[in-house]
Image (tube, grey):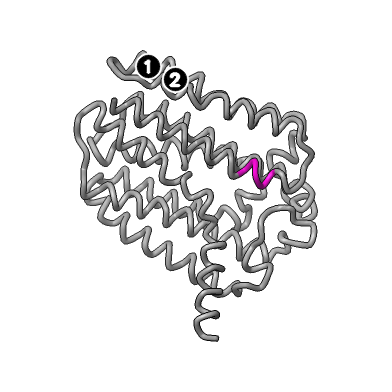
Amino acid sequence: MSSFFITSQFSSWILAIRPRTLSLSVVPVVVGSSIAWSECSKIDCFALPLILIAAISIQICSNLYNDAIDYECGCDGSDRIGPLRVTATGLLSSSQVKHGAFFCMIIAMLSGTSLVWIGGWPILLLGLISLFATLFYTSGPLPISYTPFGEVCALIFFGICAVAGTVWLHIGYLTNVSVLSGIAVGCFSSAVLLVNNYRDVASDIRVGRHTLSIIIGSRASCWIYCALMTIPFILLPLLNNLLQNKHVLIVFLCAPFSLLMIRKFFHENVGPIFNKILSQTAQIQLIYGILLCFGLLL
Protein backbone atom coordinates (compact mmCIF):
# COMPACT_ATOMS: atom_id res chain seq x y z
CA MET A 1 0.00 0.00 0.00
CA SER A 2 2.82 2.37 0.93
CA SER A 3 4.68 1.50 -2.28
CA PHE A 4 1.55 2.21 -4.34
CA PHE A 5 1.10 5.58 -2.62
CA ILE A 6 4.71 6.59 -3.32
CA THR A 7 4.39 5.54 -6.96
CA SER A 8 1.10 7.43 -7.30
CA GLN A 9 2.60 10.57 -5.75
CA PHE A 10 5.64 10.37 -8.02
CA SER A 11 3.44 9.99 -11.11
CA SER A 12 1.37 12.98 -10.02
CA TRP A 13 4.45 15.17 -9.66
CA ILE A 14 5.71 14.07 -13.07
CA LEU A 15 2.35 15.02 -14.55
CA ALA A 16 2.44 18.37 -12.74
CA ILE A 17 5.81 19.48 -14.09
CA ARG A 18 4.62 18.89 -17.71
CA PRO A 19 7.77 17.08 -18.97
CA ARG A 20 6.74 17.17 -22.62
CA THR A 21 7.40 20.92 -22.76
CA LEU A 22 10.54 21.14 -20.59
CA SER A 23 12.64 21.15 -23.77
CA LEU A 24 11.47 24.77 -24.15
CA SER A 25 13.90 25.74 -21.39
CA VAL A 26 16.68 23.34 -22.40
CA VAL A 27 16.94 24.17 -26.12
CA PRO A 28 17.83 27.89 -25.65
CA VAL A 29 20.64 26.99 -23.24
CA VAL A 30 22.11 24.38 -25.57
CA VAL A 31 21.80 26.71 -28.57
CA GLY A 32 23.43 29.56 -26.65
CA SER A 33 26.28 27.29 -25.57
CA SER A 34 26.78 26.13 -29.17
CA ILE A 35 26.93 29.76 -30.34
CA ALA A 36 29.56 30.57 -27.71
CA TRP A 37 31.70 27.63 -28.81
CA SER A 38 31.13 28.35 -32.51
CA GLU A 39 32.16 32.00 -32.27
CA CYS A 40 34.83 31.92 -29.55
CA SER A 41 35.69 28.23 -28.97
CA LYS A 42 34.83 28.87 -25.34
CA ILE A 43 32.44 27.15 -22.94
CA ASP A 44 32.24 27.73 -19.19
CA CYS A 45 31.85 24.14 -17.97
CA PHE A 46 31.01 25.35 -14.46
CA ALA A 47 28.25 27.68 -15.67
CA LEU A 48 26.58 25.31 -18.15
CA PRO A 49 24.97 22.86 -15.67
CA LEU A 50 23.95 25.76 -13.44
CA ILE A 51 22.24 27.51 -16.37
CA LEU A 52 20.35 24.32 -17.21
CA ILE A 53 19.28 23.80 -13.58
CA ALA A 54 18.13 27.42 -13.25
CA ALA A 55 16.24 27.41 -16.56
CA ILE A 56 14.45 24.10 -15.92
CA SER A 57 13.66 25.05 -12.31
CA ILE A 58 12.06 28.34 -13.37
CA GLN A 59 9.89 26.59 -15.96
CA ILE A 60 8.79 23.88 -13.52
CA CYS A 61 8.08 26.56 -10.90
CA SER A 62 5.90 28.39 -13.42
CA ASN A 63 4.07 25.17 -14.39
CA LEU A 64 3.35 24.21 -10.78
CA TYR A 65 2.28 27.67 -9.71
CA ASN A 66 0.04 27.94 -12.77
CA ASP A 67 -1.54 24.57 -11.92
CA ALA A 68 -2.41 25.64 -8.35
CA ILE A 69 -3.54 29.20 -9.10
CA ASP A 70 -5.70 28.21 -12.08
CA TYR A 71 -7.53 25.73 -9.85
CA GLU A 72 -8.05 28.32 -7.11
CA CYS A 73 -9.38 30.83 -9.66
CA GLY A 74 -11.79 28.30 -11.18
CA CYS A 75 -10.04 28.18 -14.56
CA ASP A 76 -9.77 24.38 -14.69
CA GLY A 77 -13.46 23.54 -14.80
CA SER A 78 -15.43 20.79 -16.52
CA ASP A 79 -15.06 22.60 -19.86
CA ARG A 80 -11.27 22.21 -19.85
CA ILE A 81 -9.92 20.58 -23.03
CA GLY A 82 -6.26 20.51 -22.05
CA PRO A 83 -4.37 17.73 -20.25
CA LEU A 84 -5.22 16.82 -16.66
CA ARG A 85 -4.11 19.24 -13.98
CA VAL A 86 -3.10 17.61 -10.72
CA THR A 87 -4.69 20.22 -8.45
CA ALA A 88 -8.03 20.29 -10.27
CA THR A 89 -8.26 16.48 -10.30
CA GLY A 90 -7.28 16.16 -6.63
CA LEU A 91 -4.11 14.18 -7.28
CA LEU A 92 -2.20 16.80 -5.29
CA SER A 93 -3.47 19.59 -3.07
CA SER A 94 -3.06 23.25 -3.95
CA SER A 95 -0.78 23.65 -0.94
CA GLN A 96 1.45 20.77 -2.05
CA VAL A 97 1.80 22.14 -5.55
CA LYS A 98 2.61 25.63 -4.27
CA HIS A 99 5.26 24.20 -1.96
CA GLY A 100 6.72 22.36 -4.96
CA ALA A 101 6.80 25.63 -6.90
CA PHE A 102 8.53 27.37 -3.98
CA PHE A 103 11.12 24.57 -3.78
CA CYS A 104 11.89 24.96 -7.50
CA MET A 105 12.20 28.71 -7.06
CA ILE A 106 14.76 28.20 -4.27
CA ILE A 107 16.76 25.89 -6.56
CA ALA A 108 16.64 28.49 -9.33
CA MET A 109 17.78 31.22 -6.95
CA LEU A 110 20.66 29.12 -5.58
CA SER A 111 21.83 28.30 -9.10
CA GLY A 112 21.35 31.91 -10.14
CA THR A 113 23.48 33.19 -7.27
CA SER A 114 26.50 31.36 -8.66
CA LEU A 115 25.68 32.59 -12.16
CA VAL A 116 25.59 36.21 -10.92
CA TRP A 117 29.13 35.70 -9.63
CA ILE A 118 30.12 34.64 -13.17
CA GLY A 119 28.06 37.07 -15.27
CA GLY A 120 27.71 40.12 -13.02
CA TRP A 121 24.81 42.54 -12.65
CA PRO A 122 23.20 41.82 -16.08
CA ILE A 123 22.58 38.23 -14.96
CA LEU A 124 21.26 39.43 -11.59
CA LEU A 125 18.82 41.73 -13.37
CA LEU A 126 17.77 39.00 -15.80
CA GLY A 127 17.26 36.52 -12.97
CA LEU A 128 15.13 38.88 -10.92
CA ILE A 129 12.96 39.82 -13.90
CA SER A 130 12.51 36.13 -14.78
CA LEU A 131 11.42 35.26 -11.25
CA PHE A 132 8.96 38.16 -11.12
CA ALA A 133 7.55 37.15 -14.51
CA THR A 134 7.14 33.57 -13.23
CA LEU A 135 5.25 34.72 -10.14
CA PHE A 136 3.07 37.29 -11.86
CA TYR A 137 2.20 35.18 -14.88
CA THR A 138 -0.86 33.80 -13.07
CA SER A 139 -1.10 35.98 -9.94
CA GLY A 140 -0.95 39.60 -8.84
CA PRO A 141 -3.28 42.50 -9.59
CA LEU A 142 -3.05 41.91 -13.38
CA PRO A 143 -1.66 38.44 -14.20
CA ILE A 144 0.15 38.20 -17.54
CA SER A 145 -1.95 35.14 -18.41
CA TYR A 146 -5.05 37.36 -18.30
CA THR A 147 -3.61 39.74 -20.93
CA PRO A 148 -2.70 39.46 -24.64
CA PHE A 149 1.02 39.67 -23.78
CA GLY A 150 1.73 36.06 -22.79
CA GLU A 151 3.10 35.11 -26.20
CA VAL A 152 5.41 38.14 -26.24
CA CYS A 153 6.75 37.21 -22.80
CA ALA A 154 7.36 33.64 -23.96
CA LEU A 155 9.38 34.89 -26.94
CA ILE A 156 11.41 37.23 -24.75
CA PHE A 157 12.14 34.96 -21.76
CA PHE A 158 12.24 31.52 -23.43
CA GLY A 159 14.01 32.87 -26.49
CA ILE A 160 16.03 36.08 -26.57
CA CYS A 161 16.89 36.29 -22.86
CA ALA A 162 17.63 32.58 -22.51
CA VAL A 163 19.91 32.31 -25.55
CA ALA A 164 21.61 35.71 -25.16
CA GLY A 165 21.97 35.22 -21.40
CA THR A 166 23.66 31.87 -21.94
CA VAL A 167 26.07 33.36 -24.47
CA TRP A 168 26.86 36.21 -22.05
CA LEU A 169 27.70 33.74 -19.28
CA HIS A 170 30.07 31.83 -21.54
CA ILE A 171 31.93 34.66 -23.29
CA GLY A 172 30.99 37.87 -21.43
CA TYR A 173 29.27 39.75 -24.25
CA LEU A 174 26.34 39.51 -26.69
CA THR A 175 26.45 38.85 -30.41
CA ASN A 176 24.03 39.44 -33.26
CA VAL A 177 23.86 35.69 -33.76
CA SER A 178 22.75 35.15 -30.15
CA VAL A 179 19.90 37.66 -30.49
CA LEU A 180 18.68 36.32 -33.85
CA SER A 181 18.91 32.73 -32.62
CA GLY A 182 17.02 33.76 -29.50
CA ILE A 183 14.23 35.18 -31.65
CA ALA A 184 14.09 31.99 -33.71
CA VAL A 185 13.95 29.69 -30.69
CA GLY A 186 11.56 32.02 -28.86
CA CYS A 187 9.08 32.01 -31.74
CA PHE A 188 8.47 28.31 -31.15
CA SER A 189 7.96 28.88 -27.41
CA SER A 190 5.50 31.63 -28.24
CA ALA A 191 3.74 29.30 -30.67
CA VAL A 192 3.37 26.66 -27.94
CA LEU A 193 1.66 29.18 -25.67
CA LEU A 194 -0.54 30.38 -28.54
CA VAL A 195 -1.73 26.79 -29.11
CA ASN A 196 -2.50 26.53 -25.40
CA ASN A 197 -4.48 29.78 -25.34
CA TYR A 198 -6.26 29.05 -28.63
CA ARG A 199 -7.38 25.66 -27.30
CA ASP A 200 -8.59 27.19 -24.01
CA VAL A 201 -10.52 30.18 -25.40
CA ALA A 202 -13.88 28.99 -24.03
CA SER A 203 -12.67 28.38 -20.47
CA ASP A 204 -10.54 31.54 -20.51
CA ILE A 205 -13.52 33.69 -21.49
CA ARG A 206 -15.49 32.18 -18.63
CA VAL A 207 -12.95 33.38 -16.04
CA GLY A 208 -12.44 36.82 -17.58
CA ARG A 209 -9.16 36.34 -19.38
CA HIS A 210 -8.27 38.46 -22.40
CA THR A 211 -5.59 36.36 -24.09
CA LEU A 212 -4.28 37.14 -27.56
CA SER A 213 -6.50 34.47 -29.14
CA ILE A 214 -9.59 35.97 -27.49
CA ILE A 215 -8.70 39.51 -28.57
CA ILE A 216 -7.83 38.82 -32.22
CA GLY A 217 -10.13 35.86 -32.93
CA SER A 218 -9.57 32.41 -34.39
CA ARG A 219 -8.60 33.35 -37.97
CA ALA A 220 -5.99 35.88 -36.92
CA SER A 221 -4.67 33.39 -34.34
CA CYS A 222 -4.07 30.93 -37.18
CA TRP A 223 -2.01 33.50 -39.08
CA ILE A 224 -0.03 34.46 -35.97
CA TYR A 225 0.79 30.78 -35.44
CA CYS A 226 1.81 30.57 -39.09
CA ALA A 227 4.17 33.53 -38.63
CA LEU A 228 5.69 32.13 -35.45
CA MET A 229 6.37 28.77 -37.13
CA THR A 230 7.81 30.44 -40.25
CA ILE A 231 10.03 33.25 -38.88
CA PRO A 232 12.68 30.86 -37.48
CA PHE A 233 13.29 29.59 -41.02
CA ILE A 234 13.22 33.07 -42.57
CA LEU A 235 16.05 34.01 -40.17
CA LEU A 236 18.27 31.12 -41.29
CA PRO A 237 19.81 32.82 -44.37
CA LEU A 238 20.63 35.86 -42.24
CA LEU A 239 22.26 33.65 -39.62
CA ASN A 240 24.13 31.84 -42.37
CA ASN A 241 25.56 35.15 -43.63
CA LEU A 242 26.68 36.16 -40.14
CA LEU A 243 28.29 32.78 -39.49
CA GLN A 244 31.06 32.11 -41.97
CA ASN A 245 32.04 28.50 -42.64
CA LYS A 246 29.02 27.14 -40.75
CA HIS A 247 26.17 24.97 -41.96
CA VAL A 248 23.03 26.35 -40.29
CA LEU A 249 20.99 25.95 -43.48
CA ILE A 250 20.76 22.28 -42.52
CA VAL A 251 17.96 23.37 -40.20
CA PHE A 252 15.69 23.67 -43.24
CA LEU A 253 15.38 19.87 -43.00
CA CYS A 254 12.72 20.33 -40.31
CA ALA A 255 10.75 22.98 -42.26
CA PRO A 256 8.26 20.40 -43.65
CA PHE A 257 7.27 19.46 -40.08
CA SER A 258 6.59 23.11 -39.33
CA LEU A 259 4.43 23.43 -42.45
CA LEU A 260 2.51 20.33 -41.41
CA MET A 261 1.75 21.88 -38.01
CA ILE A 262 0.57 25.10 -39.65
CA ARG A 263 -1.80 23.08 -41.83
CA LYS A 264 -3.15 21.25 -38.77
CA PHE A 265 -3.67 24.49 -36.87
CA PHE A 266 -5.68 25.97 -39.74
CA HIS A 267 -7.85 22.93 -40.44
CA GLU A 268 -8.45 21.14 -37.13
CA ASN A 269 -11.43 22.03 -34.97
CA VAL A 270 -10.66 23.16 -31.44
CA GLY A 271 -10.58 20.10 -29.20
CA PRO A 272 -8.26 17.49 -27.67
CA ILE A 273 -6.30 17.34 -30.95
CA PHE A 274 -4.72 20.64 -29.93
CA ASN A 275 -3.02 18.90 -27.00
CA LYS A 276 -1.11 16.91 -29.61
CA ILE A 277 -0.45 20.02 -31.71
CA LEU A 278 0.98 21.72 -28.62
CA SER A 279 3.41 18.90 -27.82
CA GLN A 280 4.39 18.53 -31.48
CA THR A 281 5.10 22.26 -31.72
CA ALA A 282 7.50 21.88 -28.78
CA GLN A 283 9.07 18.86 -30.51
CA ILE A 284 9.70 20.90 -33.66
CA GLN A 285 11.55 23.48 -31.56
CA LEU A 286 13.65 20.65 -30.16
CA ILE A 287 14.47 19.35 -33.67
CA TYR A 288 15.20 22.90 -34.86
CA GLY A 289 17.53 23.44 -31.89
CA ILE A 290 19.38 20.14 -32.42
CA LEU A 291 19.91 20.84 -36.12
CA LEU A 292 20.98 24.43 -35.39
CA CYS A 293 23.55 23.22 -32.84
CA PHE A 294 24.77 20.62 -35.32
CA GLY A 295 25.16 23.30 -38.02
CA LEU A 296 27.01 25.62 -35.61
CA LEU A 297 29.45 22.96 -34.45
CA LEU A 298 29.95 21.11 -37.74
Q: Residue at x 44, y 55 (%)?
A: 58
Q: Quadrant location of the C terminus?
A: top left
Disc 2 designates what residue?
Answer: 236
Helix, strand or loop under label 1: helix
Q: CA distance from mark 1 to mark 2?
A: 6 Å
Residue 207 visible (yes or no):
yes
Residue type at mark 1: give it: Asn
Q: Residue at x 34, y 29 (%)?
A: 294
Q: Residue at x 74, y 38 (%)?
A: 215
Q: Residue furthest bottom?
A: 1
In the rendering, at what x and y percent does residue 106 appear?
Answer: 38, 64
In the rendering, at what x and y percent does residue 181 appear?
Answer: 41, 29
User: What are the residue bounds of the magenta stretch?
Assistant: 274-278
**Residue count near mark 1 (Cα–Cα under 10 Å), binned few <14, some 14–19, many ≥20:** some
Residue 272, numbered circle = none
In the depicted view, which residue is nearer to us: 30 or 77? Answer: 30
Helix, strand or loop under label 2: helix
Quadrant of res 38: top left
Residue type at mark 2: give it: Leu
* Magenta stretch contains residue 276: yes
In the rendering, at what x and y percent does residue 213 appear?
Answer: 72, 39
- Tags 1 and 2 in contact by the CB under 8 Å rule? yes
In the rendering, at what x and y percent does residue 107 appear?
Answer: 36, 62
**Residue count near mark 2 (Cα–Cα under 10 Å), binned few <14, some 14–19, many ≥20:** many
Position of 165 with respect to 60 (left or right) is left
136 shown above or below 99 = above
In the depicted view, which residue is nearer to us: 141 or 298? Answer: 298
215 shown above or below 229 = below
Disc 1 designates what residue?
Answer: 240
Q: Which secondary structure is most common in the magenta stretch?
A: helix
Residue 153 visible (yes or no):
no
